[in-house]
Image (cartoon, rainbow, N blue to C red):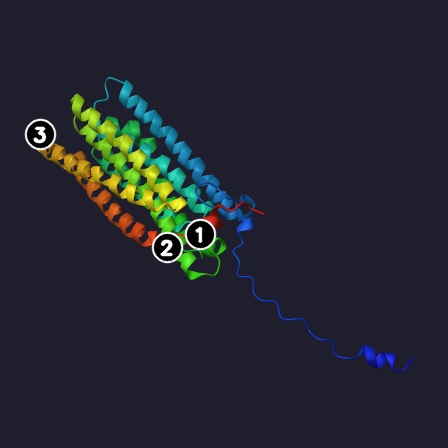
Amino acid sequence: MDEISPLLGNQPQERPDPLSPNLRPRHQELIPTPCGPIKPWSELSCLLKLYFCFAVASLLALLGLTLTSVYKQRMETDVSDEDNFTVSLIQLVGILFCIYYIGRGVLQENRQELVAFVLSVLVVMVRSVVNFSVLGSKGKQELLVRFVCTMCLGVVHVLCTSLLIQRPNMMAFRVGGALESLQEQYFLLNLCFSMVTFDLQAQLCLCILITTLDSAMSARNSIILGVGVVWACLTAAVGAVAVLKEAKVLVWVFMVQNLPQVAFFVYLMYTVGVKWFQDSSYTLEAAAVTGALISLVIKVVLFWGLIRLVHSFGQGLRERMFAPSK
């Protein structure tokens, strides 16, 4: 028996079945938030952490400079350049949205938000160049620091964010899994959510433009613009909830809510047309027309994405996005 036992030990054993690839989304490694899952801070690379901190710090510093400029332009009696004040307000709104875009773009690997961040930075840079070029010598001295900071930081952010956009994106697989339908739905969801916030930014800038176009604005126009701002914020909130919660009813409500906004654009064009030839400078008027056209393009893209997104509701993406981490 002792001589046979080694032979028995050398008998071939059955090999276990090869492990099947794990195609389940790694959602347990993500942090669920009301705006969708985000990557934990520890997962970011050192360079990405460094750039993210630099981006937020630089935007906050630029925000402080812009707030200082707005305060001086409003409080000092010798400052009468309304165009400069308008650009400062629009730049203030743009910086606030840029902080949101870079945060969501980095933590969610959201290319749409990163593209929106680049576009917002470019718009802020173009506005700064146009505004600085038409100022007098005294105005240029007052805004020289803000102008230099805006241009230098803008170039750095555009280059660095462009590199981030070209990086491979695995967030759709991590949230939606291996199913291409869920990955496409996740892409459309992020696209629509980004367009909702981008549309809100454009409408707020339009309200600032139309408000400053007429320094002696009537009470009726002030009420209309005030209602327009509140309506734009309410519409954006409904659109965001409709997209994230896969609520078809809210999607149609959101589309109906956009109809008064289109009417507001028509009213804005009428107001700009009346004001167009009353001043020697047409900078703000041209900006208002351009902003209205951009808003219409944003709404067209948003409606196209929403119509495609509605047909993919109910496939389980919402449960994957907002499931508690394990």
Type of amino acid under label 1: Leu
Residues under labels 1 and 2: Cα distance?
A: 9 Å
Return the x and y of residue 155 as percentages of the image width and height: 36, 44
* Residue occupied by mark 3: 278
**Which quadrant, please, contains the N terminus?**
bottom right
Under circle 1, the secondary element is helix
Under circle 3, the secondary element is loop
Type of amino acid under label 3: Gln
Is any atom of residue 191 visible in this view?
yes
Q: Nearer the viewer, mark 1 or mark 3?
A: 1
User: Farthest right residue?
Assistant: 2
Rendered image quadrant of residue 57: top left
Circles 3 and 2: CB atoms closer than 8 Å:
no
Circles 1 and 2: CB atoms closer than 8 Å:
yes
Return the x and y of residue 59 as percentages of the image width and height: 40, 36
* Residue occupied by mark 2: 312
Circles 1 and 3: CB atoms closer than 8 Å:
no
The crowding category of the residue bearing disc 3, from other C-alpha atoms within 10 Å (few below 14, some 14 to 19, many at least 20), is: few
Q: Nearer the viewer, residue 189 or 291?
A: 189
Q: Nearer the viewer, residue 106 or 298?
A: 298
Sequence-wise, which precedes: disc 1 or disc 2? 2
Rendered image quadrant of residue 288: top left
* Residue occupied by mark 1: 317
State the residue at coordinates (34%, 29%). 66
Type of amino acid under label 2: Ser
Under circle 2, the secondary element is loop
Residues under labels 1 and 3: Cα distance?
A: 54 Å
Q: Nearer the viewer, residue 113 or 126?
A: 113
